[in-house]
Amino acid sequence: MAPPHDGKTAAVFEEESTPERRISSVLFVIAMQTEASPLVDKFRLIEEAESVFPEGFPWVRYYGKYKDLNINIVCPGKDKALGVDSVGTVPASLLTYASVQTLRPDIIINAGTSGGFKAKGASIGDVFVASHVAFHDRRNPLPKRDIYCIGTRQAFSTPNLVKELNLKVGKLSTGNSLDMSPQDAAGIISNDATVKDMEGAAVAYVTDLLKVPTIFLKAVTDIVDGDKPTPEEFLLNLATVSAALDRAATQVVDFINGKSLSDL
Ligand code: ADE
């Protein structure tokens, strides 16, 4: 058979002429219960009775239908021994991997709270969409290993969404500590980050491997370059900022509803 007249292969020709399908399944990966609860209520999701995850794991899944979308929210749950949220990169990456394998989402939203840098324009309650994510607490001076450790990845690009919803855009830097050591600070500056969290780059590592488009939605609970101690400021603002995150996440889902990936 002769190739299509412009010389493209049949596969490319077919792909270009096939209309992209609408997004039908959205997976939220959320580290803390306080961050997830308002969204579970807003979307009227129910907690699954029989876990799709391995027996004995603390991971929690909420699911349901909102508008035309199947929504799943997964959380790493409470540490078995201490009863606190299983925050950080290790639970986030494991949970993301297992959830994608089981739930096959069209798109992932990693939503959560973050520290923000006022020098980069962040204020308490701001909700940022991350353009890039990277690690600030993994170091190796050897050639190429240095770049591997930083692990910079571009987030899925959503120009229409950020414009329509008037969301702030900035770079996100991830590490396993709520505080910031001088070495972490240097990494964050080098990453040109506006917001700092404990999961984003780990989620990105997994979703990059699994080729699932991922949006990072981060609400600012504390100003890292301000004068208040981070743990106190974080706890003080957690509930109100979770509500702001919930409003932004709802707007994002409303925007996604009925659209395909290329519309975002
Ligand atoms: N989540 C909320 N505030 C944070 C901070 N300052 N660092 C890391 N994760 C956070």
Image: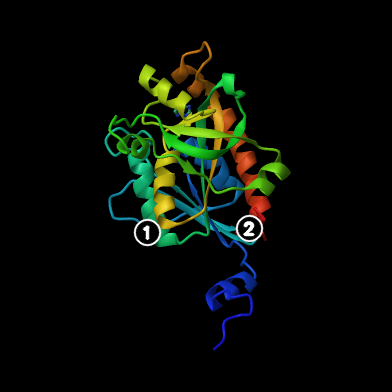
Question: Which of the 4 image quarters holds residue 65?
Answer: bottom right
| Picture coordinates of residue 70, whole percent (x, y) | 56, 60
Residue 12's mark? none
229 over 238 or under it: above or below: above
Residue at point 42%, 21% (across, down): 185
234 over 165 or under it: above or below: above
89 and 201: which one is in front?
201
Residue at point 56%, 32% (across, down): 219
Q: Given this view, does label 2 or label 1 mark the residue nearer the observer?
A: 2
Query: Amino acid under label 2?
Result: Ser
Q: Is mark 1 within 8 Å of ligand 1?
A: no
Q: Which residue is mark 2?
A: 262
Give the farthest residue toward the right.
164
| Residue 77 visible in the snapshot | yes
Query: Amino acid under label 1?
Result: Val
Residue at point 59%, 48% (across, down): 157
Dot 1, how many residues are within 10 Å of its Cα: few (below 14), some (14-19), or many (20+)? some
* Element at label 1: loop
Q: Relative to 94, is 162 on the left or the right?
A: right
| Picture coordinates of residue 182, whole percent (x, y) | 38, 17
Q: Quadrant of the N terminus?
A: bottom right
Colour scheme employed for the rendering of this structure: rainbow
Q: Is mark 2 within 8 Å of ligand 1?
A: no
Q: Which residue is mark 1?
A: 52
Dot 2, how many residues are within 10 Å of its Cα: few (below 14), some (14-19), or many (20+)? few
* Element at label 2: helix
Residue at point 60%, 51% (across, down): 43
Give the farthest residue toward the top.
227
